[in-house]
Amino acid sequence: MADLVFWKNLPYDITRKISESFLATDDIDHYVAFRAVCGNWRRATDSTADATDPRFMPSKWIMLEHSIHDNDRVTFFNLSTGRRLRKKIPTEVRNRRYFFVGVTKGGLFVLGQRAQPYQTRVLNPFTGAMARFKVHIPMEQVSSVVVTTSPMMVFISNLLNDCVSWADQTSEEWHTAFGFGEGECRTGDWGFGDGHKNLTSFAGSMYITNKYGSIISTITDVYKEGNQWKRSAGTISMFTTIVGPNFELAHGSNNFYLVESEGELLLVMDGRICNGMPVVYKVDTVNKVLVPVRSIGSRALFVSSRRCLSIDTTKSNKFHSIESGTIYYADRSVVRAYDQGSLAGSGWEEEPKYVFESATNPFSKMAELLVNYCTTIEYSELQMLPPYGEEGYTYYEYGDPSD
């Protein structure tokens, strides 16, 4: 009993330091459980009720399941620590009050109401907090979603990967940028040709790449409200900000990948077409140039046209079976793994370490898990709808779908 009283009456500063250590590793579930122990610990720590508070928004998790309504629980994986978390699906999703639109790299659920006014929601499955958006759920079928903060915004990429839409919590409609070929780059015309990929949030902006290796990013203007400068979805536009590394070589190849890696944004080129060129570039978002990277060190990169991720193999002993300095290309059904060579010369080994069908992975279970995550197609429920909707939701609420 004396021990229990001692722990419950820890000094506030110590209690806060313990709770903050959970947030440092993105173990938000531990933080929530810690606050639930007693009143003193709750009073010493901050509530997670605000869905827009960036401190409690997961950033290092990926969700491994891809059909959440087939399961009572889903599995999350921490890219920093290698920890797995089996978590019960929130009631709001289980009882089918919402469409499941998609899950972010980080673990936030983007949902849509099944009944009028069919608005968009962002649910934090680690805290149960939900952010409400005025904008209706997207009519386009969705291939990927990203949520950013300050202010909270939702970015979506459609199934054809030819447009990106975004909205903040006050938006009445989606702001959209399309691609229409190789012309002048502006919102509504990026010059990315017939597709983009790897919608990625980095340093407060959104980035995608195209088949030429060019970088398209958001440009945000600010406005003054009282004594404060603010930004909103309406002040954002998208431009090609960095031209690809070699247009002639890359023309039509569609073999570039964008991945956030240990505080850097990297552009990765397919080793089969590098022809002595650097394979990995750091995207210098300040000077707007691509800087060749000579070595990725202890990192391993997993890249595909659907998802990309980076693992620092030294951060946890759970990553010991993943080979550092390796890039796993996981497009389509074939997986190729290369050692990154000296990028000053020939760039890559002549042959990859592995070339195999993804269904017969010869490498470690950990690498297999990450390859499967990158290659699995994640269909949102919007893609499961009949052409003219389903009970409780119809595209005709927004107009004739043939328009």
Image (cartoon, grey):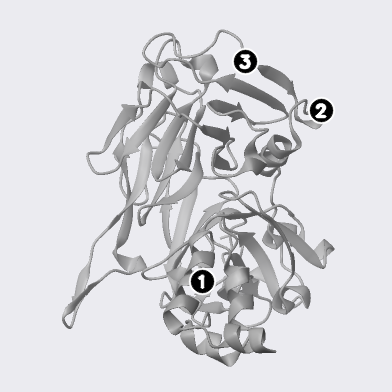
Give the amino acid at mark 3: Pro
Give the amino acid at mark 1: Ile
Marks 1,3: beta carbons within 8 A: no
Q: Nearer the viewer, residue 190 or 342?
A: 342
Give the residue pinned by disc 3. 352
The kind of secondary structure element at disc 2 is helix
Residue 124 visible, this orientation:
no
Give the amino acid at mark 2: Thr
Task: For label 1, count other residues whose C-alpha is less than 10 Å away and answer few (under 14), some (14-19) or many (20+).
Answer: some
Quadrant of residue 126 within the rendered picture: bottom right
| 377 to 100, vertically: above or below | above
Q: Distance of mark 1 from mark 3, alpha carbons? A: 45 Å
- Residue at the image point whose x is 58% and y is 81% from the top: 35
Q: Is residue 256 left or right of residue 388?
A: left
> What is the x, y in percent for residue 144?
57, 52
Q: Earlier in the sequence, mark 3 or mark 2?
A: 3
Give the residue pinned by disc 1. 18
User: Which circle marks residue 360 in the picture?
Assistant: 2
Task: For label 3, count other residues whose C-alpha is less than 10 Å away and answer few (under 14), some (14-19) or many (20+).
Answer: some
